[in-house]
Amino acid sequence: DGGITQSPKYLFRKEGQNVTLSCEQNLNHDAMYWYRQDPGQGLRLIYYSQIVNDFQKGDIAEGYSVSREKKESFPLTVTSAQKNPTAFYLCASYDRPYGYTFGSGTRLTVV
Amino acid sequence: QKEVEQNSGPLSVPEGAIASLNCTYSDRVSQSFFWYRQYSGKSPELIMSIYSNGDKEDGRFTAQLNKASQYVSLLIRDSQPSDSATYLCAVNTLNTGGFKTIFGAGTRLFVKA
């Protein structure tokens, strides 16, 4: 079955540590996205990529970095510069007219 | 600031009733409109997309779009306890180089058995 695979499902980060969230897709979609979800808030865009080797900052890119070396993969690194990283992170691909297909998410907690 | 507004709820309806979820948006040039369902602790899944004024039906779900009034709604007929979830409204607007999606914060729906 085609879809978006995110790992790990739960991730714990210590102060000053960088962590990387994995996102892989087999839908053959060009566009991939990272969103952050906090309780009571809408999804906020961190980064997106419309084509391999190219990506753009979203609304809340500070403290995050991404790469897009392969069409199938779009990993997100949460750096130590992100001071409030505890959230639910969602990776998605987009294909008109179907909208977004989301992965199962990674729940990141600072310990 | 482009916005998408939803009543946070919770909206509580009895089993078998019609649930009506509403969403308003601020950008008049918005083009595409989506409803996603999100169960607690899970990721959103697409229920409906609508692009032109009027109604679009899919099973028990009907999306309604009124661009002049800048609102989009989702009706769920014969509501079931399994419909209990948070429903996210999403709107695509034009942006430099393409489009941007703005998500509402969601409406929590409870269907009482």
Image (cartoon, coloured by chain):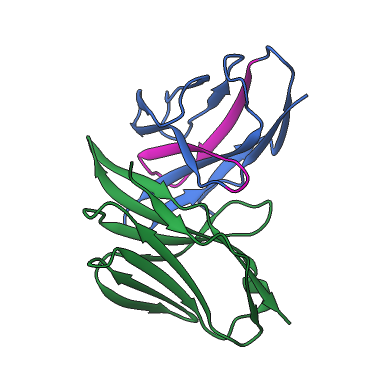
Chain colours: A blue, B green
Looking at the picture, tell me which residue is in the foreground, A76 or A52. Answer: A76
Question: Where's residue B78, x and y in %?
Answer: 57, 86
Q: Is residue A9 above or below residue A42?
A: above
Classify residue B56 as left or right of residue B31: right
Secondary structure that dominates the magenta span: strand
On the rendered image, what quadrant is the N terminus of chain A found in?
Answer: bottom right
Q: Is residue A70 magenta?
A: no
Name which residue lies at 66% across and 84% down: B15
Q: Is residue A19 magenta?
A: yes
Q: Is residue B101 above or below residue A23?
A: below
Name which residue lies at 42% across and 25% down: A68
On the rendered image, what quadrant is the C terminus of chain A found in?
Answer: top right
- The magenta-colored residue range is A18-40
Question: Where's residue A53, x and y in %?
Answer: 35, 23
Question: Where's residue A23, x and y in %?
Answer: 54, 35
Question: Where's residue A86, x and y in %?
Answer: 66, 31
